Amino acid sequence: MDVVTVGESMVLFEPNENGLIQYTDHFKKRIGGAESNVAIGLSKLGHSVSWISRLGDDPFGRYIYSFIRGEGVDVSQVKFDSNANTGIYFKQTGGFNQTSIYYYRQQSAASFLNHNDMKEDVISKARFLHITGITPALSQSCYETVIHAIKIARKHNVKVVFDPNIRTKLWDSSDYIPILKVILKMADFFLPGEDELKLLFPNEAPDEIIAKVLKFGVSTIIVKNGAAGATYHTKSESQHVSGYPNEHVKDPVGAGDGFAAGFISGLIEDLSLSDSVKRGNLIGSMVTMVHGDCEGLPSRQEVLGFEKKTSDVHR
């Protein structure tokens, strides 16, 4: 197994046409979840990946399970819970050029993840464990589950990739800062956005933050900055890698997950850090060209075709 990831996926409802939800009568049904987005992205790039989660034993849970399995992701570690529902959320993209997310996930099946859901023989066989800051926000048991998974990974020299993916709607005030820093100190690769780094280390200069994080034991920090690209930092080097700005952005949600999938794919293939970040930038940009959180994640052939594109029409 190349990668194991842990987290909640939900059913996403989005208006058929751009506009405010309160005036919408018809919705499209999709799925969304940072960890499953990354899992799907990696699978479409040809890598083996296992997604661990809990779903409600309901039509929404079965829909998510079938969808993710259909994308080639191993879902053998997913459990169905007959006592809790699958989470849902709504995405509004047509309101005054802003994207708004409304969650209905409290007490969802995934919020009851626990350490018994983390099988040592599954995590130990992976090369990378992918973790986000969303899962520990769902409940105390989810936080403890994430820590348990990381401890298993470290015990077996499985590299930990941590994307803070800060969702302030899921946290009380700034409670996320000490919790996410605990996870950060256990990670090998740290993938914050530029704004997330400021949230985690308020009132500190960027250079001071980078130096502090490297002292924690993190081997590589990749600071993402949207279309401008990303900058990676290790103890021996720092380098900016240009992004792939495009004029066809249809849906910005999921770009960070696309970056993570591309970057981890590069690590799996033993590409240089620069080339791994470059692949992350490219896939992050491609994701924004398609509506939906995961529908724009490209196959390997689509990535190669995009890089070599000489025409907008493929015959």
Image (tube, helix red, strand yellow):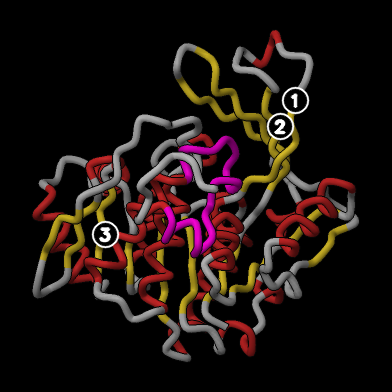
Q: Which residue does the image show at 10% across and 55% down from the upper left?
A: 208
Q: Look at the numbered disc 2 and give the secondary structure of its residue.
A: strand
Q: Look at the numbered disc 1 and give the secondary structure of its residue.
A: strand
Tell me: residue 203, above or below residue 280.
above
Nearer-the-camera pick, 207 or 275: 275
- Spatial distance from mark 1 to mark 3, Cα to Cα? 36 Å
Of the two numbered discs 1 and 2 on the same chain, state the one appearing first in sequence.
2
Of the two numbered discs 1 and 3 on the same chain, state the one appearing first in sequence.
1
Instruction: Return the residue found at the far front.
Output: 315
Please tell me how crowded label 3 is: few (under 14), some (14-19), or many (20+) other residues with Cα within 10 Å: many
**Label disc, if present, on residue 27 of the rendered structure:** 1
Hey, what amino acid is under mark 1? Phe
Residue under pointer 2: 13
Hey, what amino acid is under mark 3? Ile
Tell me: residue 117, above or below residue 224.
below
Hey, what amino acid is under mark 2? Phe
Please tell me how crowded label 2 is: few (under 14), some (14-19), or many (20+) other residues with Cα within 10 Å: many
- Spatial distance from mark 1 to mark 2, Cα to Cα? 6 Å
Q: Quadrant of residue 180?
A: bottom left
Q: Find out whether the residues at labels 1 and 3 contact each other: C-beta distance under 8 Å.
A: no
| Left or right of 113 on screen, residue 228 | left
Q: Find out whether the residues at labels 1 and 2 contact each other: C-beta distance under 8 Å.
A: yes
Question: Does residue 302 belong to the magenta stretch?
Answer: yes
Q: Which residue does the image show at 52% across and 67% down from the upper left?
A: 45
Of the two numbered discs 2 and 3 on the same chain, state the one appearing first in sequence.
2
Q: Which residue does the image show at 36% across and 58% down from the upper left?
A: 280
Magenta stretch: dominant SS? loop
Please tell me how crowded label 1 is: few (under 14), some (14-19), or many (20+) other residues with Cα within 10 Å: some
**Label disc, if present, on residue 222 of the rendered structure:** 3
| Magenta segment | 287-305
